[in-house]
């Protein structure tokens, strides 16, 4: 039996309050103060992962810091807390531990954590990229978008996931736009794409402006706040939101019935899986970053696989191959924590067509006047 662990943390203080009823009426500041005093702990045991070639069991390990604490507290302190969670995993006898959500972002993206632990470490970002691209391409097909003619925006392009998405999408997109806050890092990435792939992307630091003209948006920033609002998107746009916390406002699903927003990186796990907790997904499904840790354990590859700020395309292709070997696959298309039916996607496509016609009408009227 192969063994793994995965470190997770509450995204917000409210997430912690939902788990621990005694804190439900506390203000967020109280909750975050209490969380800083708590040690890392075993959340649940994961049973029933069975592939055609192996079986595995694992544990979720809780690191009690919110996303904002991960970003705003001193980096040395946050890394120490994540390493403590990794040592809880070590004591359980696992061969590899995965870093979830912001634990994979802090500091040098897992390198320091890997150095301080006696077990392998992975962020899961390689399989996250693989499933995000696969989901985006499938969504575009359903919405009638020809990627070869489309403007594709990678939002958060200078992060490890964003840069990898940019590398893979560069030869596929009609026009590639890279958006991030750091201009120097954007220029470095653009230089790499020109040299290695022959694609010269457009660079954007004005995120809102870049979103408004994009046919396809892959959102992978590490921002704590929501970045994409209903008024930002063009009719018929496809948005793959890989970020946690989400980059796309819930208002988009409520107001914009003519755009398709999908969750990136949700996969089906082989076997009769019991995660021991409910993190809002249907049975037997998990985030791709979690799945990467499981896949490596099933394969017996107890090696630090995806750490640091650079993800190689070869890594992404390898984890895709191993995922298929062990029976992992994309869990359909999901939007804001629920599955999308083909009927709903058809309705979105029809609404997009209608919105485009309404936008085109004034143009046709001006042409008629000129004629």
Image (spheres, rainbow, N blue to C red):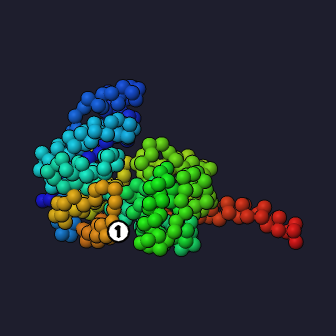
**Coordinates of residue 241 in the picture (x, y in percent):** 46, 55
Residue at 27 percent across and 51 percent down: it is: 110
326 or 34, which lies in front?
34
Q: Is residue 45 above or below residue 20?
A: below
Image quadrant assignment for residue 361: bottom right
Q: Is residue 27 above or below residue 126?
A: above
**Coordinates of residue 120 in the picture (x, y in percent):** 19, 55
Q: Secondary structure at mark 1?
A: helix
**Coordinates of residue 215 in the picture (x, y in percent):** 57, 63
**Coordinates of residue 70 in the picture (x, y in percent):** 35, 40
Q: Answer left or right for 174 relative to 73.
A: right
| Residue receiving disc 1 | 313
Image quadrant assignment for residue 41: top left
Residue 98 seen from this side: no
Quarter of the C terminus within the rendering: bottom right
Q: Answer left or right for 305 relative to 310.
A: left
Residue at 73 percent across and 64 percent down: it is: 360
């Amino acid at each position: 039996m192969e063994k793994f662990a995965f470190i997770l943390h509450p995204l917000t203080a409210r997430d912690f309050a939902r788990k621990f009823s005694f804190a439900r009426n506390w203000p967020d500041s109280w909750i975050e103060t209490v969380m800083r005093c708590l040690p890392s702990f075993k959340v649940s045991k994961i049973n029933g992962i069975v592939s055609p070639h192996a079986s595995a069991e694992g544990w979720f390990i809780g690191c009690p810091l919110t996303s904002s604490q991960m970003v705003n507290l001193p980096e040395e302190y946050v890394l120490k807390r994540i390493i403590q969670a990794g040592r809880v995993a070590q004591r359980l006898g696992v061969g590899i531990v995965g870093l979830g959500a912001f634990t994979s972002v802090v500091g040098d993206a897992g390198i320091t954590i890997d150095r301080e632990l006696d077990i392998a470490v992975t962020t899961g970002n390689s399989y996250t990229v693989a499933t995000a691209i696969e989901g985006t391409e499938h969504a575009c097909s359903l919405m009638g978008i020809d990627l070869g003619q489309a403007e594709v925006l990678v939002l958060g392009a200078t992060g490890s996931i964003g840069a990898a998405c940019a590398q893979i999408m560069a030869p596929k997109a009609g026009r590639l736009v890279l958006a991030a806050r750091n201009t120097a890092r954007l220029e470095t990435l653009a230089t790499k794409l020109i040299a290695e792939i022959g694609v010269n992307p457009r660079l954007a630091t004005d995120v809102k402006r870049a979103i408004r003209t994009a046919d396809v948006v892959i959102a992978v920033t590490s921002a704590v706040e929501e970045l994409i609002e209903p008024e930002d998107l063009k009719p018929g746009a496809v948005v793959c939101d890989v970020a946690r916390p989400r980059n796309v406002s819930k208002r988009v699903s409520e107001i914009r019935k003519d755009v398709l927003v999908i969750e990136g990186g949700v996969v089906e796990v082989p076997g009769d899986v019991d995660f021991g907790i409910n993190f809002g997904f249907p049975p037997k499904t998990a985030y791709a970053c979690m799945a990467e840790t499981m896949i490596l354990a099933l394969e017996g590859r107890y090696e630090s696989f995806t750490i640091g700020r650079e993800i190689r395309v070869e890594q992404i292709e390898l984890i895709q191959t191993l995922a298929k070997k062990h029976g992992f696959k994309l869990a359909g298309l999901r939007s804001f924590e629920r599955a999308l039916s083909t009927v709903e996607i058809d309705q979105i496509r029809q609404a997009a067509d209608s919105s485009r016609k309404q936008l085109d009408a004034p143009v046709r009227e001006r042409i008629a006047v000129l004629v």
